[in-house]
Amino acid sequence: MIALDLPPLVAGFGRRLHDAGVPVTPERAARFAEALTLDKPVARTRLYWLARATLLSDISQRPAFDRVFAEIFGTRAPEVEAPERESRETAQDERPSTSREGDGGIGAPATGRGEALEAQEAPVPVLASDEEVLRSKRFDALDPAELAALYRLMTRLEIATPKRRTRRAQKARRGEHIDLRRTLRGSLRTGGDPIRLARKRRRIQPRRIVMLCDISGSMEPYSRAYLQFLAIAGTNAEAFVFATRLTRITRALATKSPERAIRRAAAAAPDWSSGTRIGEALRAFNDRHGRRGMARGAVIVILSDGWERGEPELVAREMERLSRLAYRIVWVNPRVSAAGFAPRVGGMAAALPHCDALVSGHSLEALAEVIDAIGAERGGEPPPIPEPEAEEPWGSATPQPGSSVAMPSGYGPSRGRTTPGW
Amino acid sequence: MNDLEYYAPDVETLAQLLATADYLVDEGLATSLFLSLRLPQPLLLEGEAGVGKTEAAKALAQVLDTPLVRLQCYDGIDAAEALYEWNYPRQLLSIRLADSSGDKLSEADLFSSDYLIRRPLLRALEHPGPRPAVLLIDEIDRADDDFEAFLLELLAEAAVTIPELGTIRATHPPVIVLTSNRTRDLHDAVKRRCLYHWIDYPKPQREVEIVRRRVKGVSETLAVSVVGAVARIRDSDVQKPPGIAEAIDWLKALELLGIVELDAEALERTLGSVLKYGDDQEVVRLLGLESLVS
């Protein structure tokens, strides 16, 4: 390491990192080069830390960074203490390298997912009558071209969450508070006499929306359509997918092109179509994100059929924790619309007492209800819910496809039993 | 040779200096702090709560023997609270005085630096030297996006623009340390302008050294058993794993109670200083308090 030929080294390293998914800007590369001149990297560990401090911008990039560093400089990254908790997190944020191999498919698609993406490259004209059909067609019965058309219809949906008041004030003619700063400023114009009172009020902002989408095997017919739904949710939304583990895909979805967004999201999650561990996923969400503030005062949307492999007790406990943090929890379960549905599946039954609304969202029409449920304010008094017949499973009492199902009295949530569409 | 080169000629020297301030760093953090001083470049520190993100800035200020200017972020913080505010009552008073005494007072007089209330960011920029102040922007993730955007000029140029006065450029650009608890993603534009370091929990051996430096005169055996218990709690199923700060608090509590050996009973009495959630205490009790101190 006596005469390092700097520019090629830096450029090569930067390029390899970029290929591995660590966004290395020229600015960062230049900073790395400068760092190398400040302190001679006598040992490989020093080189590692100089590179890491300058080139990394998030801890989730660490696995990729370590891999590339080892490839180029011939050793493992130096022993860095990585407690269990943290390594779990980074492992899950890691983008698998398969994502770059240009496979358009989502994980291991059962039928024609690959073609689905191809088909979407070419625009499919949608006639009005087709649109009508699409609106009510179940998501699991859609073919690839219809999915593409569906996306365009979905982009017309507007998802609005309830508002919250922020600490930041804005000027308002009839605001509730007097804005001393502007009042006194204005008074300088009138010789120091505050003649006109300027007013301000606390700014109102839409609440954050957090979507957790189940991508396990049992949800597979719906997951593509739901991912599209996640992709249109916009800038105020956080998106996660889970099957056996939880993956944050907010960043992957943050792109203009829906195709790219969904491809990137698919590549980010390693556990497509595997089993479901809702409880584990919820716990990971609560521990890692919810508790830190993401769920606080937010509207949580869980898209899952509630078929849980793990213990339902864990689901119940984590749902309770989540409901203490969140403003409202909306559970979207495509199987609600099926005749004879009853929330007897372990996970669903355990989660239900903590949900504020349970809606089906199995078709585009039904998604409108989801959007209503998201936009609903937390009610003080729950709306009256008729008692179901004693023996009859309550789910079948409302067999209308597209209708939402109210909570039976036995499952009464602790608060705000607003079930839109009732 | 400027002062920063004197204090941080290389990574090792800086690490030793920080150790004299009772702040022990591993090579990764030392390298990041070194680069932040010498490039110079703001440093973004992330990590679990209580691993010493804020302490890093304090130790840096102590080592450089300069003031630490701290800006605690919160939802809704804005320029008037972070940067500057005009002293309106004083302006009004001056107008009245000028009125009664017949003095001439122009608007430029009113918006001069006499009437400026300096908030933390401005104070850090205007620090006269000889060494730059250390500016700690704490928990930046609590502020909103607008505030991040407002910080960009400061981070990139070490300058701020006040409409009435013009651009104020620091003669000694402050050493800027930002901390975040990752409650939300920071904007790329902020990250782009910063060096980045993730602070891990230290290895047990190192943690013992750290807590013993912070709680003077405590026996090594007690420190070792506390650090061991804290490590086991971190590995267990608790929602809020205790950081180094909690380990230090706990040790202080034990010392105050005159406990020299950590056993299940002592643990039960002092559990509240290390676990702050009822649920978490329950988790640990189910594990068995004895298993933590064995």
Image (cartoon, coloured by chain):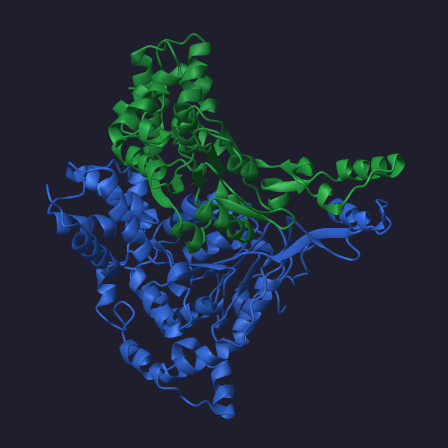
The color chain A is rendered in: blue
Q: Residue at x 17, y 52 (%)?
A: A9
Residue A319 in the image: state x and y as whole percent: 48, 49
B261 and B289: which one is in front?
Answer: B261
* Residue drawn at point x = 21 percent, y = 48 percent: A66
In this view, the residue in front, A87 or A336, is A87
Q: Where does the N terminus of chain B fall, quadrant-wise? A: top left
Residue A393 against residue B271 in the figure, above or below: below
Which residue is pictured at 28% across the width and 49% down the height? A91
> What percent of the width, then of the height, locates residue A116?
32, 80
Image coordinates of residue A295 in percent, x first then y, are 51, 50
Which quarter of the figure has residue A81? top left
As drawn, A293 above or below A340: above
Residue A154 can be seen, yes or no? yes
- Above-or-below relation of B168 to B205: below
Q: Which chain is green?
A: B
At 32% from the left and 27% from the top, the residue drawn is B6
As drawn, is A411 to the left or to the right of B51? right
Out of A86 and A286, give the one closest to the viewer: A86
Q: Nearer the viewer, residue B24 or A207?
A: B24
